[in-house]
Image (cartoon, grey):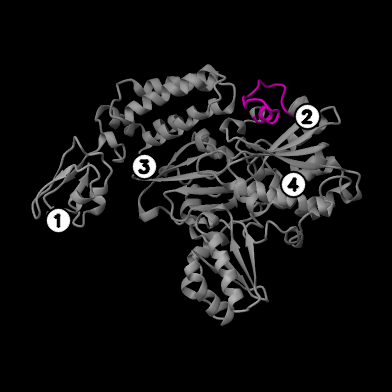
Amino acid sequence: MRVVVGQGSCGVATGARKTAAEFEKQIAAKGLGIDVSVTGCVGTCYLEPIVDVYEDDGALTRYVKVQPENVEKIVEEHLAGGKVVEDQAISDVDKEFVTRQERIVLRNCGVINPENIEEYIAVDGYKAIEKVLKSMKPEEVIEEIKVSGLRGRGGAGFPTWFKWNAAKASPGNEKYLVCNADEGDPGAFMDRSVLEGDPHSLLEGMIIGGYAMGACEGIIYCRAEYPLAIKRLEIAMEQAREKGFLGENIFGSGFSFDIRIKAGAGAFVCGEETALIASLEGERGMPRLKPPFPAAKGYWQKPTDINNVETLANVPWIIYNGGAAFAKYGTEKSPGTKVFALAGKIKKGGLVEVPMGMTIRDVIFGIGGGIKNDREFKAVQMGGPSGGCVPADLADTPVTYEDITKTGAIVGSGGMIVMDEDTCMVDMARYFLNFTRDESCGKCNYCRIGTKRMLEILERITEGKGEDGDIEKLEELAVKIKEGSLCGLGQTAPNPVLTTIRYFRNEYEDHIYNKKCTAKSCKALIQYKITDACKGCTLCARNCPVNAIEGKVKELHVIDQEKCIKCGKCMDHCKFGAIIKE
């Protein structure tokens, strides 16, 4: 028997390390001699901390939301007594979250110990690179990736084989393979979970890619805000070198390839490949004109290929199982699986990996469990700040590169931020534009100044100061910013605004002409009022942080609108439903 505690960032944030320490303490106290191991995130972030108990015959019992105070009972009844603690175990409904998925990239996450290379080897780790180096030519590797149809999972969806082939065809003996692990979209955590839960799959994918294109070195550009991911990558790299999988003369093939990590400072613009290269070279992360493309002149003007974490983590599985096996999933033009991060107003927040072509509705309701508190589904933001808003009436849209693009959004790196009826779409557009305005490198006038002007208009609208013609100004500025920006950040920055105008124009009009927020979300456009149902219990007045509520005991209370900061605490504490928001 062994105990495995999920310790990805989500698990750690909910107390998994304390839970693991309590298991070690209780097991030692009872002299059970059971190992307590670590693993990454299995995807069910909403159930963390998660503890898996494996019997000697391989049978698994998964315990969820395990805090230190729950440990003693599990140790006494299950580890020592052999009886499952049913009230702490995962439910059948929650099991569906994992069983309805097709896991390729996430195949080992939450299963193996990411800090122990032996566990990766036990699940056929590094067999793909052994196959490549012992029996395949670089051209054959590229052809296998072409057969798979693997497209870049970082956002653009560009064919992976084409980029590898372009770098291979570029003259020169000094070439580089760069992994873009600078995951910066709000609400996106796919790459982080792979790095924390299965770092060796990324390393193996990079080695294979390096061999295919003739690269001499690999570089992982990972944001410094991912300390756990960097730590586990460093452990994995050291273990791989000790085994001879990284470094000189790998598998005695004559092929040498090593990898290093560059910690980025968290600039969103460095998700653009030329800005990332500039940062690697010690310069400020700002995009460069293309052509020449990185495949011809990239890092230090040498041929360079850049892929993101998820793209490269697919590679070992594809090579080991064959490109045709991967292409069986998904659709003809968007083959394979895709990892999505479910966040926002959704019941089961976490990571899912599904075949491309599954509908948005199936992802959100079939796997994600639907909307929190059974509220009305309103929209989903896809592709982060570079993407767009897909409304509920388009929920049956298949998740493919082509179909999502038609809605005005993009698949992007895989973030899905779910919104319910209480979400103001104008404010949502303001939020994302504020992000891209802050993250603009400032090189292009249209991006630097244009996003600021758009943000000013949106701020006015959400403050109840919108004017006739503001919607048209936003649309005009959006077109000019798209056309005048050098890189993808500026070219896509207006997308959240354009899609919310396209699908929720009525909300913009209500803000501007009726001075009303349809979702009752924008503070400047709402009021809290006490109705005749008030019993005069004084709870609202006692909990108001600015003393804006007046009234005597057992008499109707009144809110001073001049003092009210619209925090909503009065409504939260009212036991009689006497306070309304309008």
- Secondary structure at badge 2 equals loop
* Membership of 533 in magenta stretch: no
What amino acid is at disc 3?
A: Thr
Mark 1: amino acid: Cys
Mark 1 or 2, closer to the camera: 1
Q: Earlier in the sequence, mark 1 or mark 3?
A: 3
Q: Is residue 282 magenta?
A: yes
Give the residue at mark 1: 537
* Circle nearer the viewer, 1 or 4: 1
Q: Earlier in the sequence, mark 3 or mark 4?
A: 4
Picture disc at residue 423 = 3
The image's mark for residue 303 is 2
Image-based side of 486 in relation to 569, left or right:
right
Crowding at mark 2 (Cα within 10 Å: few <14, some 14-19, many 20+): many
Name the side, left or right, on which 26 lies relative to 241: left
- Tag 4 residue: 205
Q: Which residue shows up at 62% across the image and 27% down it? A: 285
Local SS, label 1: loop
Residue 416 appears at what percent x and percent y? 50, 45
